[in-house]
Amino acid sequence: MTPLLEIRGLRAEIAGRKILQGLDLKVDAGEIHAIMGPNGAGKSTLSYVLAGKPGYEITGGEILFKGEDLLAMAPDERAAKGVFLAFQYPLEIPGVATVTFLRTALNAQRRKRGEEELSSPDLLKRVRELARKLGIDPEMLRRPLNVGFSGGEKKRNETLQMALLEPLLCVLDETDSGLDIDALKIVANGVNALRASERGMIVITHYQRLLDYIVPDVVHVLAAGRIVKTGGKELALELEATGYAQYQNVAA
Ligand SMILES: Nc1ncnc2c1ncn2[C@@H]1O[C@H](COP(=O)(O)OP(=O)(O)O)[C@@H](O)[C@H]1O
Ligand SMILES: [Mg+2]
C-alpha cells in the first residue's frame, strides 16, 4: 500500500544554512507519529517545508503525499489535498470572525477540489455541532480569529479547524512552546478525537509531557537534521530519562 507520507533523503537550507540533512520518514494512514529532538534539530523546519513556507531551499530528496510529489504543489493545493499544518503561534486576524475564517478556509479547499461550496447556514450548523462535541463555547466563533485568545482557546480553535477540514495528514508543531497543561490536554484531546484509519498525524514536541496524553504508534528522534532513531512509545519515556545528549553526538 502507498504510504500516506514518505520523505526520502530530504535536504533543506535556509539563508545558506543546511538544516535538514538527509531526512527519511514514512507515515501510514491510521498512525500517530511523534517527532522529538533537541532544540535547533530542524523539527520546525520540517513542518515549514511540509507546509511550503517560502524561504526554504530544497537541495535534495523528495516528499511523496499519497504517492504524489508534495514539493511540486503550491501551499493551497497541499491543503486541498488534505495536508493540515498547525503552528505554535497561530495567525491572528483582527476584524475576521472565527466562523468567517473557518468558512473561507473550508470553501477555498472545496472549490480547489471542484466541490460545491457550503452555504453559510450549513457551515454554521456544522461548526456549531463540532464545537459542541469538542466542548468549545460557541461565543468564541464570533470573536476575531485568535485575537486575544488564551493559549487554550487558540488550541481549541485549532482543533475545531482540524475537525472541520477533515485533513488526511495533520502536522502539529508544539515544540518548545509555553503550553500549559490545560492547553496540552486540549491538543491531545483534539488529536485523539481525530485519530482515524484514513488519517495520519505527526506531533512534533521537544518534551515528553504531551505524550502523556497522546499515545503515539511511532516515536522518532530528530537530531542535526536527520531521523536518528525510531521506536515505539517507550522511546519517548527513555528520552525523558536520558535526554538528547547521546543523539547530538550521533548526529554530529
Ligand atoms: N531564518 C533562519 N535563518 C537562519 N537559520 C535559521 C532560520 N530559521 C531556523 N534557523 C536555524 O535552523 C536550525 C533548526 O531550527 P528549527 O527547525 O527551528 O529547530 P527546532 O524546531 O528543532 O528547535 C536552528 O539552528 C536555527 O537556528
Ligand atoms: Mg521548533
Image (tube, rainbow, N blue to C red):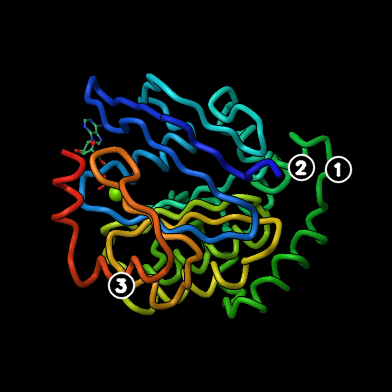
Horizontal and vertical percent for residue 22? 35, 31
Which numbered circle lies on residue 15?
A: none
Closest to the observer, 188 or 75: 188
Give the residue displayed 59% in from the left and 66% down from the top.
141
Label 3 environment density (alpha carbons within 10 Å; few <14, some 14–19, many ≥20): some
Label 1 environment density (alpha carbons within 10 Å; few <14, some 14–19, many ≥20): few
Give the residue displayed 56% in from the left and 48% down from the top.
84
Give the residue displayed 70% in from the left and 56% down from the top.
198
Residue designated by label 1: 116
Q: Amino acid at mark 1?
A: Glu
Are the two marked residues, 1 and 2, in contact with CB atoms closer than 8 angstroms?
yes
The secondary structure type at the circle numbered 2 is helix
Q: Amino acid at mark 3?
A: Leu
- What is the distance, in whole Å, between disc 3 and disc 2 at their CAs? 41 Å
Choose the circle earlier in sequence order: 3 or 2: 2
Closest to the observer, 190 or 213: 213
Q: Is residue 125 left or right of residue 188?
A: right
Which numbered circle lies on residue 110?
A: 2
Closest to the camera, between mark 3 and mark 2, is 3
Horizontal and vertical percent for residue 187? 46, 69
* Quadrant assignment, res 69: top right
- What is the distance, in whole Å, between disc 1 and disc 2 at their CAs? 6 Å
Q: Is residue 44 above or below residue 206?
A: above
The secondary structure type at the circle numbered 3 is helix
Query: Would you say the beta carbon of the disc 3 residue lies within 8 angstroms of ligand 1?
Result: no
Choose the circle earlier in sequence order: 1 or 3: 1
Q: Amino acid at mark 2?
A: Arg
Which numbered circle lies on residue 237?
A: 3
Choose the circle earlier in sequence order: 1 or 2: 2
Q: Is residue 134 left or right of residue 147?
A: right
